[in-house]
Amino acid sequence: MTPAGAGLDAVALDPGTTLLVSGPVMTGKRRLVIELLTNHAADGTVFVTTRRGAAAIEREFESVAPGSSDRLSVVDCVSAGTGTSRGRSDDREYVSTPGDLTGIGIAVTEFLRERHSRGEQANLGLHSLSTMVMYADLRRVFQYLHVVMGRVSAADFRAVCSVDSSVVDERDLDVLSQPFDARLELREREGRREFRVRGDDLGPRGWTPLDDG
């Protein structure tokens, strides 16, 4: 496994925990979400992608944790619109747009239900909510998150999602944060990334270096 920043070890994601990662664009949120998901033992991950195709996400999981893509199911909200999708497979489901919350919800539920029926542990990842709110209104996205995060917690799974704080204003960010147990905030300062955790006691509350060195 490619080592994550040392500070990431301070983030505790117990089964049933839901976490929102927020920060400006180009701060490595997608990579951080994947690192958090693969750092915690599970039989696999269900990942919703609204910006990159399934193949790219599978490669990124492999670069972070070799072998993790073998236990990965991807809900691809990108490729169907470009004509590059190949239909449904055992580990991929294609949804028309990031605004098709019903389709996304059905795909996520099916993948998680399959794992739960086999008695497996699982994670849920999503990158990025910012794209969702560009296609669907904030209230619908909030309702979707409220339902899905509730199911994740009830099944003792984990969820880590991301949002661009420079795209979504603070008021909307507060709304999107409500269905989660906590929010991990990212920032860049003097060329280095720092983070803090607000909400449940899942990590440091003061700004903490994320990257090594």
Image: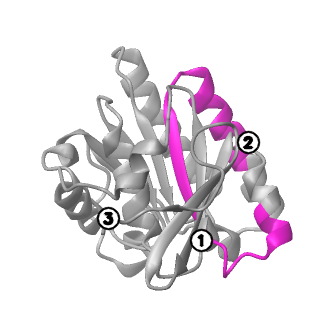
- Which residue is tagged 2? 146
187 on left or right of 150? left
Q: Amino acid at mark 2?
A: His
> Which span is picked out in magenta?
144-173
The quadrant of the picture occupied by the C terminus is bottom left
Percent across and percent down for residue 166 are 66, 81
Amino acid, disc 1? Gly
Residue 23, numbered label: 1
User: Which one is in front, 69 or 77?
Assistant: 69
| Pair 1/2: label in front | 1
Mark 3 or mark 2: whose residue is earlier in sequence: 2
Q: Secondary structure at mark 2?
A: helix
Horizontal relation, residue 79 to residue 72: left or right: right
Say which quarter of the image contains residue 195: bottom right
Q: Residues within 10 Å of mark 2 (few under 14, many from 20)?
A: some
Where is residue 159 drawn, in percent x and y?
52, 41
